[in-house]
Image (cartoon, rainbow, N blue to C red):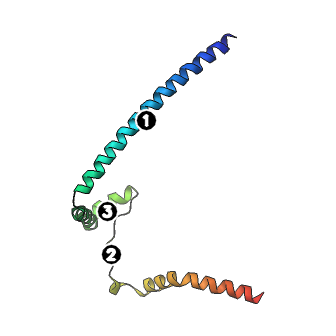
Amino acid sequence: KRTLKNNKKSMETLKQENASLKSQLEAQHKKHVKELLKRKIRRKSTSFSSENSVIEDIKEKRTRSSGLSESVEEFGSTPTLPKVPAKKMSMTDKARSQFKILKPKIMAARNLNRFESK
């Protein structure tokens, strides 16, 4: 009987704690949402082109300094590679891109042949 009474009391205290924690969490969430909205408004106020140029500068720095790109690889993210223009594309790359385009068509044709042969 004593343990039952103790359990009931502990359950009531736990419910009260739970309610208070929920209210705290909701308050934190509301604050966080407000901050995010403020940030969004600030971001919109800055010009979009300047952000793009900053991102491009970072990419150029990564590709320029090999030491930095190695340290980036250690952390798991891949460094950005400079885009290769179409003229420099090797024959194997061309074949690969063609195959990627043609593969679904090839598979469809194979499936049709299987059904026709049966």
The residue at the point 21 percent across, 62 percent down is 50
Q: Mark 1 or mark 3: which is in front? A: 1
On the rendered structure, is 117 left or right of 2? Answer: right
| Above or below: residue 82 compared with residue 115 | above
Q: Which of marks 3 and 2 is nearer the N terminus?
A: 3
Q: In which quarter of the image is residue 33?
A: top left
Q: Mark 3 or mark 2: which is in front? A: 2
40 and 3: which one is in front? 40
Q: Counting other residues with Cα less than 10 Å from the Cα at mark 2, is it few (<14), some (14-19), or many (20 or more)?
A: few
| Above or below: residue 46 compared with residue 59 | above
Q: What element carries label 3?
A: helix
Q: Residue 105: horizontal and vertical position, in percent?
A: 58, 85
Q: Earlier in the sequence, mark 2 or mark 1?
A: 1
Amino acid residing under circle 3: Ser
Q: Which of marks 1 and 3 is nearer the N terminus?
A: 1
34 and 90: which one is in front? 34
Amino acid residing under circle 2: Lys
What distance separates the C-alpha of mark 3 from that of mark 2? 16 Å
Q: Residue 118: horizontal and vertical position, in percent?
A: 78, 86
Q: Residue 43: horizontal and vertical position, in percent?
A: 26, 54
Q: Mark 2 or mark 1: which is in front? A: 1
- Residue under label 2: 83
- Residue under label 1: 26
88 and 31: which one is in front? 31
On the rendered structure, is 1 left or right of 28? Answer: right
Numbered circle sitting on residue 69: 3
What distance separates the C-alpha of mark 1 from that of mark 3? 42 Å
Name, please, the residue furthest toward the top: 2
